[in-house]
Structures are given as structure tokens and as C-alpha cells.
Image (tube, rainbow, N blue to C red):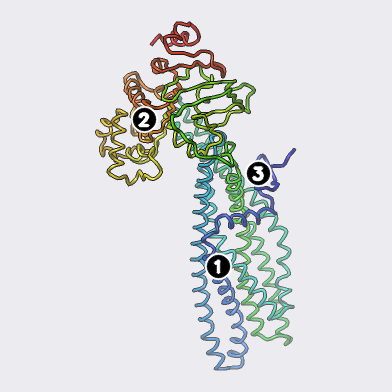
Amino acid sequence: MNRPIVNGAEVQTDGGATRPSTRRAAGLIGRFLRLTGGRWWPYMAAGGVAMLLVAASTSLTAWLMKPAVDDVLAAGDTTMMWVVGLGLPGAFALKGISNYMQRASMLYAGLGMVATARARLFRHLMALDLAFFQRHPTGDLTSRLIIDLDTLRSTITSTGIALGRDVATLVSLITTLLVMDWRLSLVGLMIFPVLVLPVAALGRRARRRATDLQETLGHYDALLHQAFEGVRVVKIFGTPERERTRLHGVVLRLFGAMVQVERIKILSAFLIELASGIAVALVVLYGGHRVIDGTTTAGTFFAFITALILAYRPIKKLGHMSAVLQEGVAVLDRLFAILDTRPELREAPDARPLAVSDGAIRLEDVRVSHAETTRSALDGITLDIPAGQTVALVGPSGAGKTTVLNLVARLRDPSAGRVCIDGQDIRGATLESLWRHVALVTQDVTLFEGTVLENILFGAPDAVDPRAPSAEERARAETAARNADAHAFIAALPEGYDTQIGESGLRLSGGQRQRIAIARAMVKDAPILLLDEATAALDRETERRVQTALERLGRGRTTLVVAHRLATVRHADRICVLEAGRIVEEGDHDSLLARGGLYARLWAGQGGA
């Protein structure tokens, strides 16, 4: 059985979940710093300097305890009294200022790195092909962008910031202890190496539990997304109780994962508390004996106890951070699992901009096979669509009609054969130049939260900002809306073109959303138009109005139409009838009816409407 490879290294799996091995944790953190550090390195460097000052000031506080006892209290040295009296507040002031500088610098850098990661992840997701999004639930992807990166933000801003400071402080204090009395240091510190193995084991366990937690959060988010998006179906089909039961099961798993993570943190803290108590007791017993027999001074012993107590805080925090840090490592593994995903559909290394003069389309012996089935979606289709003509694809469900549209838009590639536009194989063209010349209107209209105007201008070139359009761009959008038969209802909205339409345009009817989508395609003014069942879900009157708008949109463009209702394509220049991935009939409406084949049967099945 092959072990999964992620980020170029083997990973351990448990219960189907991919988890980072211990040796990869440092590699993941280093890779994240290289990926997102960039402009934030100067802030991290400033934070590093401040960390060293915090460590130095903490050690200075412990050092000053020796003269405070031996010289000031025991010997009555007035000069040393002033040195200690001014030195202690100075040390505390230096520590406070340095701590502020360190936290501010590292917090700014940490938040900046997470922001960079958010932008990088979103940009990468947008570059992935359609097949990736068909394999991954929307809720899981949004969970990685929101919940995972919020966990990473928390890890960096709390654990990451304190980690360097506490390590530097601990090293400084251990050095101080060794210089003061190396024998007493060995007594006080010998208990802590015993903790290495159990704390390391708890760290590995924490990472596994953190991975479970993040995956369960993704599943939870996906279920919420499905329930909210399909709330009408849930209510009408009377399944709210079933959805509540499903969600309750996930909530219980989420609860269990959270309890496991927190339990590990508590256990780590307990072990460190216990070890620290034993260390202090040993130092008091051994150090007190050395003071009594005159081997060391009371000042040295008091300074040693001070340094040991000061070292206790960073040791305790480091033990707690070990478990918290594993949550961040688990998030990094999920982050890089996405960033290391390469699109199946890629540009050729020597890809050139597509030069479109007329917009003629040709499919040459195209075959498409699905990996999950032995049946071909398309089986040797050859199709010519002359420039400026409207060609309709009709046939039973699963015949391959939408697959043809996806091939022309290069949302997927054929298994064999090629697709050409104006004689150029589109696999040799840059994707941006191809999509610039193609407009798409589908049955399931996608509108974005914002105003009507912003959604219409979404089809405008990148140079246009839909949120701050010029008067010329606003006029262009209004002209497109008039041609799409949308201006009248838009003008009747409370704020006209500036009306907020809500998420997915839910404040509009289906016909209104469809006409806005048509206006958006008109604004794009692409030479090639793809229509995928654009009127399938509309009533007859709305369908008539949308169909009229589509006919205006298609004038002078090469138009490829997928239709279920044959009445909407009866005036197409050519109709191709698909069945089982093949073109079985071809011609205009009248000739196909006269032939009495599949098209005629489909027409009769729709009442000859």
C-alpha cells in the first residue's frame, strides 16, 4: 500500500486522515515562513532583538538579588543599595518596553503572514480547474479559508509570538543559574529532561487530535452550507429532524475532538507543574544545606531561587504551547495540501494569446472519458460551427451536451481529438485570452452579493471597477439591461441599479436573475456565446421575454446552445441531436421533423410545442 505523499514527503495516516509526521512539522513551519515572510521579515527581526532584551532584563533581575542580600542587607553597603534600588526598576522598565516592542512587531508580522496566506490560498483556488471543485465540498473549502486560517492566526499571535521570547528567556536564565552555581543548577534542572519523552508524546498526540478537529470543523461547515443553501428542500420534504440528527452527530464529534485537544493541554501543564514543584523542593533542600555549612552565601541562594522561579513561567508556557503549536502544524498541513494541488487543466509552456477574428468553432473527432465510469461522455464527435451562426445541441439527459460546452470554454480537455477556434487549437492558447472571447449564460445563474450595477459590470474588462463605475460605464450597463429586457424591473427597484440584491441574488425572481446574467454577457461583448439551458427553469411568459433577450444577445456572435425545450431552438441555424455521446442527427428544425427520428420523437414528447 502506497503511503500518501504531500509536499514532497511521506505522511502518516490514521483512519483515512492525512497527518504530518513529527520530522515534517519543522519543515512545514519553515516553508510557511518562506512562503509568507516576504515584506514581514524586518518586523520579525525587530521582534527578535526585542526578545533578546526581554531575556537579558529578566536575567538582570535575578542577578541583582545577590548584592541586594549580601551587600545591602548583610553588609549595609549604601552605594550598592543605590545600585540595586535603581537597577531593579530599570530592569523592569527595560523588560516592559522590550516586551511591548516584541509583541507589537511580531503581532504585526504574524497577522500580515496570515493575510498573505489567505490571499495566496484564494488565488490558488481560483486557478484550479472545475474538476477540483466537483471533488471538494464548498463548505470544506470555505472552512480552510476561514476556520483553518483563523486557527493559524490564533497560533501565530499567541503561541508564535511568545515562543521566541520564552525560549530566549529560558536560555538566558539557565545560563545565569549555571554561572551562579553549577552544582545547584544540576540539582534544580535534572528533573526536566525526564519530561522530554512524555511531553513529546503528548505533542504528537495533540497534532493528531488537532488534525481530527480541523477536518471535523470542515465537515461541520459543509453541512451548515448544505442545510442553509437547501433550506426550502429541507422544509418541503419534511426532513429538518433528519438534518438536525446529522448535524448533532457532527457536533458530538466536534465536541469530542475539542475535549481531546484541551485534555492534552491540561495534562502537559500538570506534568510541568509537578516537575517544577519537585525542582524547587530539591533546590531548597540542597541549597539550604550549602548555605548552612557556609559553602555558598545567602545572597547567591536567594538569587538562584529567584532565577529558578523566573524560569518556571517560560517552562510552563512552553509546555502549554507545545500542544497549541500542533494545532497550527495541522492547519499548515491542510493549507499546503491545497497549495500543492496542481490543476489537471494547464496552459502549455509555450501558450500564446488566442487571436479571434470571426469566432468559428470546430471539434475534431473529440472523445471524453470519465475516470469514474467506463462509458464515454463523448465518442468521436466532429462538429463545425461557422462564425456568426447559432447551433443548438439537444438530446436526452446524459447525452454529452454540456460536456461540449465545457470543452469549447476549456473548462475541461478532451481525452482525444481537439477543439479549435478560428483554426487554433485552444490547448495552445492562454486561458485568459480564451475566456476573454467567451460569454456564458447558464440555467443556474450565479450572481454575487452587491448591487445590480456591480453584477452587470462583472462582465466588463478588468480595468473597470464595478464598485466605482464612471458615467460612461453606467450608461453601458443600462444599455445592456435595456437590450436584456431588464431595465424596467431594475428601475422599479428601491434604489434602481444601486439596489443590493442579496447573496446569490435571492431578492430577485428567477427571470430577473436570468436577465441580469444576459445583460452581464452583453457588457462582455464576446464573439462566442455559450447558452446552457438558459430558459429551462422559467415559466412560459418569462421564457418568452428571456428568449427574446437571448436572440438580441446572439446577433453577430457564434452561439452554441444547449436546450431541453426544443421550442426555444427551433429557429437555430442548425440543430445537432446527441445520444450516448454521439451526434445521431443534424439539420434545421423542419428537416429533422421530416426525418421522423429522435428529434421528431422528442418534439412530439413535448407536445409539439
Say which residue label 2 marks.
518
Residue located 36% across and 30% down the image: 518
Rendered image quadrant of residue 71: bottom right
Residue at disc 3, secondary structure: strand
Q: Quadrant of the C terminus?
A: top left
Q: Nearer the viewer, residue 186 or 204?
A: 204
The circle on residue 45 is 1
Q: Which comes sooner in the sequence, label 3 or label 1?
A: 3
Q: How many marks?
A: 3
Q: Which comes sooner in the sequence, label 3 or label 2?
A: 3
Amino acid bearing label 3: Thr
- Left/right placement of residue 127 relative to residue 319 reads left
The circle on residue 18 is 3
Does 549 appear above or below 176? above
Amino acid bearing label 2: Ile
How dense is the environment of label 2, judged by Cα within 10 Å: few (below 14), some, or many (20 and up)? many
